[in-house]
């Protein structure tokens, strides 16, 4: 009886979730839309009926919630809802793409295929990167694939609590490195902020909870402040006779955390904790700009502005379509307040991004903002034989937050990521212009190809048909397009030169009566190259001794590699007598004692016993990193298959290296004495290195010392903070 009651409760739960989904859909759905949505729902319910999520709830609740996010939070229509409901059926159930195509048509089948991961046995060094490349290849045909993928990832992040800790870290890293910037690039600012906040919650739960607690405690005070700030503005805004609304909101948790880290100030000293948004309801077009500037004039009449913080994305929208005026003013009590001014149309684009962009396409003069970006993604995908990791790294550069604006001699504006170079500019004009770029002028003055662009630069490219890319060019560019095109050109050059090496190898194997096609990949591995092309080129330039081939065994005209002595899932070098001093600290890797492997503590983050850690597998051994290491997100997002769980088993008397940054008021030689006496004499710790500099009454020092564990480290930090004229003490992350 109890089991029947539970089944009935789950059925009601599923139906309630489906009704909530239907409420978010627009009322102008056609009968065919309603029929197709119902059919997709019933098919998904039946297909997932035996499946449950890690939390124990019925799996079908996940696709229903993804569909709701698509329509309510992103603004997509009925086709996306159907695809969201079906997004896991091909991957996780017996339903085939052919059945989807038959029941819902080619478009739905294509989108569902884009959302379906590659076969789990796909022969790839990085199936994660291959999967993402597949998703992106469908993006250029139908952006709904990526938008549904964003909704899928958002719901997964919201319900990540039931996953094992090491999996949470991998998913959070991939989210912060790829999905959050992608959400920004598609104009989904709310989703981007939530991605960053949820990633912070996983990676640094103590900092996240501390900020949440302080925001909760100060909420009433902030609300009062915003109301007091708005009051004098409303008197002035009422007189312009343009409908408007004002909202106030705190900065995102992740942006507050970022300020705490970068500016090294406590929560209480962050003054611009909140932003005020003024949204005017006016005709679309030129009048929107006039209304925004009129409101700006009123705001800066009432409150003193900080001129260098004015950001005008109304005159020149961002490359993702974002339009708004941002200014920071000095509010009541000297507190900084960011004010955002925009129209209702601009606000919808800011909230809904790409989906809203198409609704208003043609209204502003930036109607093709996404087209150029999608073209750049298409160009990255053109190299079908390219390495998936290289593609992922190149794609990341297309997800820039900050931009630089440069101009052609004819006055055409080119938007590139901040930090882009003159050579990046050449490739952004046209691939051939980049290939044959010989010299570059900025304002008619010759500059190096590596010159970093500044806003407003006018760039002239001088080309020569005999010019071609070289290896050094890769060091001069940052954009994915430029890097991809340069690599393609270099590979073509390698292919031409590699033909000589290939012919030499064919002759050698023929003389040894060895089958070339059956043995060439064995030789690639034997000589340690990544692919055949690199091997051929190395033979051409005499970097390979072909006589070494005789060391290999031959079986039926086929070369055979010798069996390795130690083989593990990741080809981890094994060493029974490695790192004995550290092994006494009780370090476990993948559940095994760490001394089983060759490993070391990463210098980029200096883990200390008690830190949350993970192991990264490389060809030469393992590196143990802190979870909040500056390199952690990139390693986990790009090389998740090489990440292993690591943990401290028990506390010991081993010492670990850690580095602290200390700053404060410079009151003379007494600063050094107080610091060294406190650390060495009072706390009894060994200082490995100490660098300090003082200027204008301010000092900053870096101290490397040995500690037993994180508990002792926290005692050190608290003790140093309590010293006279020390204002801040933080652990260095890298």
Image: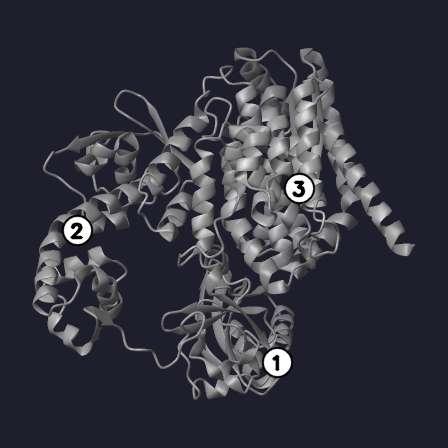
Residue 715 quadrant = bottom right
Tag in front: 3 or 1? 3
What's the distance in space between the residues labelled 2 and 1, CA to CA? 50 Å
Write down the residue under mark 2: 494
Residue drawn where x is 75% and y is 52% of the image: 57
- The image shows residue 544 at horizontal and vertical percentages of 14, 67
Residue that lies at the very extreme toward the front in this rendered image: 556
Do we see residue 695 in this rendering?
A: yes
Residue 126 quadrant = bottom left
Q: Nearer the viewer, residue 191 or 123?
A: 123
Do we see residue 29 in this rendering?
A: no
Residue drawn where x is 67% and y is 61% of the image: 206
- The image shows residue 370 at horizontal and vertical percentages of 45, 28
Write down the residue under mark 1: 649
Write down the residue under mark 3: 63
What's the distance in space between the residues labelled 3 and 2, CA to CA? 47 Å
Which sits earlier in the primary sequence, circle 3 or circle 1? 3
Q: Residues within 10 Å of mark 1 (few under 14, many from 20)?
A: some
Identify the secondary structure beneath mark 1: loop
Locate the N terminus by quadrant.
bottom right
Report whether 312 appears left or right of 260: left
Tag in front: 2 or 1? 2
- The image shows residue 193 at horizontal and vertical percentages of 60, 42
Residue 632 vertical position relative to residue 622 in the rendered view, above or below: above
């Amino acid at each position: 009886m109890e089991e029947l009651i539970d089944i009935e409760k789950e059925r009601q739960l599923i139906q309630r979730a489906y009704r909530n989904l239907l409420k978010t859909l627009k009322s102008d759905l056609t009968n065919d839309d309603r029929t197709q949505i119902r059919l997709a729902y019933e098919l998904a319910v039946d297909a997932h009926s035996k499946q449950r999520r890690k939390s124990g709830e019925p799996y079908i609740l996940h696709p229903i919630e993804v569909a709701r996010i698509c329509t309510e939070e992103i603004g997509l229509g009925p086709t996306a809802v159907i695809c969201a409901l079906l997004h896991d059926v091909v991957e996780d159930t017996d339903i085939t793409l052919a059945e989807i195509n038959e029941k819902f048509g080619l478009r739905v089948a294509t989108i569902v295929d884009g959302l379906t991961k590659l076969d789990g046995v796909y022969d790839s060094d990085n199936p994660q990167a291959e999967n993402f490349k597949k998703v992106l290849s469908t993006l250029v045909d139908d952006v709904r694939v990526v938008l549904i993928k964003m909704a899928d990832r958002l719901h997964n992040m919201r319900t990540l609590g039931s996953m094992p800790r090491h999996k949470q870290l991998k998913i959070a890293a991939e989210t912060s490195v790829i999905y959050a910037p992608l959400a920004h690039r598609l104009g989904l600012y709310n989703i981007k902020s939530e991605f960053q906040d949820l990633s912070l919650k996983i990676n640094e739960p103590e900092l996240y909870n501390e900020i949440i607690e302080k925001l909760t405690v100060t909420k009433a005070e902030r609300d009062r402040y915003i109301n007091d700030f708005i009051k004098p503005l409303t008197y002035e805004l009422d007189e312009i006779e343009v409908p408007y609304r004002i909202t106030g909101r705190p900065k995102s948790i992740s942006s507050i955390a970022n300020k705490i880290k970068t500016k090294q100030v406590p929560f209480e000293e962050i003054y611009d904790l909140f932003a005020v948004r003024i949204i005017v309801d006016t005709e679309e077009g030129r009048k929107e700009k006039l209304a925004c500037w009129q409101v700006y004039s009123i705001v800066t009449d009432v409150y003193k502005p900080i001129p260098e913080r004015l950001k005008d994305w109304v005159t020149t929208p961002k490359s993702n379509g974002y339009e708004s005026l941002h200014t920071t003013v000095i509010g009541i009590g000297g507190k900084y307040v960011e004010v955002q001014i925009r129209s209702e149309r601009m606000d919808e684009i800011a909230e809904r991004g790409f989906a809203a962009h198409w609704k208003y396409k043609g209204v502003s003069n930036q109607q093709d903002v996404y087209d150029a970006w999608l073209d750049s993604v298409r160009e990255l995908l053109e190299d079908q034989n390219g390495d998936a990791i290289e593609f992922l790294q190149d794609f990341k550069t297309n997800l820039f937050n900050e931009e630089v604006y440069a101009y052609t001699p004819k006055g055409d504006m080119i938007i590139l990521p901040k930090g882009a170079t003159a050579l990046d500019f050449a490739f952004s004009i046209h691939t051939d212009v980049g290939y044959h770029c010989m010299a570059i002028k900025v304002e008619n003055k010759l500059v190096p190809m590596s010159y970093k662009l500044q806003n407003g630069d006018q760039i002239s490219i001088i080309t020569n048909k005999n010019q071609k890319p070289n290896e050094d060019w890769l060091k001069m560019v940052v954009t994915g397009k430029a890097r991809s095109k340069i690599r393609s050109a270099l590979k073509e050059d390698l292919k031409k030169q590699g033909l000589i090496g290939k012919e030499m190898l064919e002759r050698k194997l023929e003389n040894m009566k060895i089958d070339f096609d059956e043995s060439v990949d064995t030789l690639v591995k034997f000589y340690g190259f990544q692919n055949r092309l690199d091997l051929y080129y190395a033979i051409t330039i005499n970097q390979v001794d072909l006589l070494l081939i005789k060391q290999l065994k031959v079986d039926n005209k086929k070369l055979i590699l010798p069996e390795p002595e130690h083989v593990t899932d990741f080809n981890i070098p094994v060493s029974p007598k490695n790192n004995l001093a550290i092994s006494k600290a009780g370090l476990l890797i993948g559940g095994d004692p760490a001394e089983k492997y060759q490993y070391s503590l990463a210098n980029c983050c200096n883990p200390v016993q008690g830190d949350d850690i993970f192991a990264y597998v490389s060809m030469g051994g393992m590196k143990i990193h802190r979870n909040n290491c500056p390199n952690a997100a990139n390693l986990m997002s790009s090389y998740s298959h090489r990440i292993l769980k690591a943990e401290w088993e028990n506390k010991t008397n081993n010492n670990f290296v850690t580095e602290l940054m200390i700053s404060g008021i410079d009151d003379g030689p007494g600063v050094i004495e107080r610091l060294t006496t406190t650390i060495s004499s009072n706390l009894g710790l060994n200082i490995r290195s100490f660098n300090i500099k003082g200027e204008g009454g301010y000092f900053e020092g870096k101290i490397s010392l040995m500690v037993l564990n994180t508990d002792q480290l926290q005692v050190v930090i608290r003790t140093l903070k309590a010293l006279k004229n020390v204002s801040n003490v933080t652990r260095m992350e890298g």
